[in-house]
Amino acid sequence: MPTQRTRHMITESDELAACLDKAAKLWPNCKSRTELLRLVIEEGSKALILQADAVKAQRMEALRNLQKIGTGLWPADFDEQRKSEWPE
C-alpha cells in the first residue's frame, strides 16, 4: 500500500518471537503477527513515555534541591559587587 510514512523491516529474533507468542495470548483476536507487533510497539511506547516522564520528574526534583542548596551562598547584592570590581 502506498504511504508517505517510513517503513521498517524487522527480523523476528528468538526474543521477539517469544514476545509475540505471549502477545498472541493477550490479544487472541489479532489476525497476524504484524498486528501483534504493532500492538507490542504501542504498549512499549506507552511504557517508555511513562518512564521518560518519571526520569524528567526526578531530574526536576534534583534541580530544585540544588537550587535550595545554593540559596544564600552569595550576598543579595553579589552581582552589583562583582560588576563594581570592573572598570567601565
Image: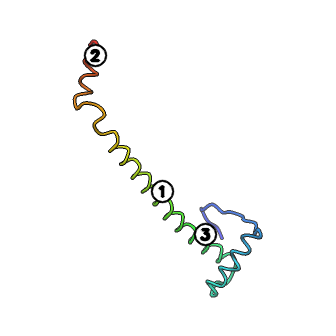
> Which callout, 1 or 3, points at the residue further toward the start of the chain?
3
x then y, percent, for residue 72: 28, 37
- Tell me the amino acid under the disc marked 1: Val
Q: Which of the image's four quarters has the N terminus?
A: bottom right
x then y, percent, for residue 77: 22, 28
Q: CA distance from mark 2 to mark 1?
A: 42 Å
Give the residue pinned by disc 1: 55
Give the side of residue 84 with respect to residue 31, left or right: left
- Tell me the amino acid under the disc marked 3: Ile
> Which disc is residue 17 wearing?
none
Give the side of residue 48 with respect to residue 67, left or right: right
> Which callout, 2 or 3, points at the residue further toward the start of the chain?
3
> Which disc is residue 85 wearing?
2
Secondary structure of the residue carrying numbered label 2: loop
Give the residue pinned by disc 3: 41
Q: CA distance from mark 2 to mark 3?
A: 59 Å
Q: Nearer the viewer, residue 18 or 41?
A: 18
26 w.r.t. 11: above or below: below
Q: Residue at x 75, y 69 (%)?
A: 12
Mark 1 or mark 3, whichever is nearer to me: 1
Give the side of residue 36 with respect to residue 46, left or right: right
